[in-house]
Amino acid sequence: MHLGRGGWSWVVFECARIPQLLLVSGFVFAPYFANVVVGDAVRGQSLIGAVTASAGLMVAVLAPLIGATVDKSGPRKPLLAACVFCLTPLLFSLWWARADGAGLPILAILTIMTLIGVLGGIIDLLFNSLLPVSVGRRGAAKASGYALALANIVGVLALVIVLWCFELPGKMHLAGLSDSPLFGLDQATYEPRRIVGPIAGMLWVIFCLPLFLYASDGLRTGLSLSAAAKSGVKDLVALVKNARTVHRNLALFLLARVAFFDAIGASIAFNGVYTSGVMGWKGPEMLLSGILIAVFCGIGALVGQALDRTIGPRRALLVELAGLLVFILGQIGMSTSRVLFVPYDTKTHGAVWASPIFAHLPDLVFLGLALGAAVTMIGAFSSARTLLVRLTPVDQVGSVFGLAALTGSATNWLAPLFISIFTARWGSQQAGFVPLLILLGLGLLTMCFVRGGDVVSGVDN
């Protein structure tokens, strides 16, 4: 199916979202804030957890109301544009998150990060609800897969640029590498870390424009905002009441989604802390692994799209969740002295190859497991989005995506809480990841009872 200009503009919009997650929430700014600005990795992680929980709670309250309202009013793009307009300057303001106290105070940075999380959640709802409007139901799998693949390519390029132009200069001597960061950024004041906020903001400005110019939007219904809100909330209540009967499969899927999305979200959030602690990886290993993971996330999006089209998103999701469970189980069995639960002495066996990083077998096996988890994780994300579109009543897309945001956000504290409890109880980071297996198992088991989301042929499903 040909996506058309509107469909491709929807795809391109994703190229602003994923790099922000990689640069700000993932590998650069969040670790800088926790370790340098706060000055205590444990307290910093605790503060970031509080920010994430607060933003998630606000999204849980707002998303269903917004989704139900736009279902009845019609257009999504005006509110989406307003959210992007507010988000961009907040990202630019992270430049002033200085570690020497001369910039924004910690409370202000936390407030900014919370607002970024809330706006990101609302943007996610509105953007996803535009998927069937922009490409139709049959084009959802292709557009979703292409969007995640292309966005991860952009994310990889962004990470490489930050690494090569800002982070490595002055620290390593390589052919073609400058002796100082681009634009004269000061390493001493962590300007190469702080620049990622403005970079993420610029990517939003660049990649949001095609969607606002070319993508289709919902048709105006003529209802006032208050009337649309009242009517939408009424339909949302009816949707929830009918979930067990009329929308049984949708309800089961949302229940399964709560479990496996919580596990996926926690895996992403704790990945850096877990990897650096269990494997002892430092800056170069973490950045390079981040680039490789982003590349394989793009591959995972294409794999998810291919599986959606060949076996249907429901079966694809079952395969992807099972694979993710196996890869995380493998990561739990890893350490610097253990490979897949089997003791391994790196001093006795020596290096596998002559390299300053990833030289020993545990490093290479863990990296392979992380890349496999990236493929299955993003594949599951893509297939879940396609399946949600397939199972959603055509006139209640916004309401259902709002309900999905509610069910996802209402429990997104569970996995972090269980990780904290298990880690403290058994004094092991590996033990702390066991709840992820439990949540993935529950999600996988519930998905076995969902019907629908098979291969679409002929007319739209």
Image: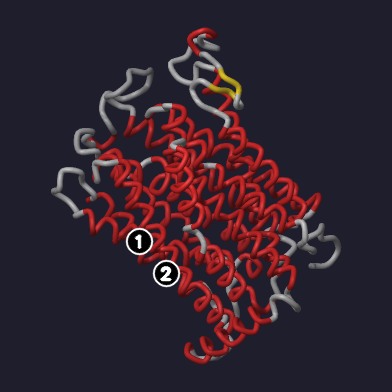
Residue 146 visible to an observer of this rendering: no
Of 410 and 92, the residue lying toward us: 410
Q: In the image, 78: left or right of 191?
A: right
Between the C-alphas of marks 1 and 2, the distance is 9 Å
Give the x, y percent position of residue 401.
59, 69
* Image quarter in which the C terminus is found: bottom right
178 with respect to 272 (left or right): left
Dividing the picture into quarters, in which one does residue 114 lie? bottom left
Task: Identify the residue at image location x=45%, y=20%.
Answer: 357
Q: Position of residue 48 (x, y in %)?
A: 35, 52
Density class for disc 2 (Cα within 10 Å; few <14, some 14-19, many ≥20) is many
Residue 344 horizontal side relative to residue 445, left or right = left
Q: Is residue 36 above or below residue 63?
A: above
Q: Secondary structure at mark 2?
A: helix
Tell me residue 219's x, y (percent): 60, 81
Question: Is residue 128 shown to the viewer in this render?
Answer: yes
Residue with the mark numbered 1: 114
Residue furthest toward the left?
102
Total number of numbered discs in the rendering: 2
Residue 260 image offset from top left, x and y in percent = 61, 54
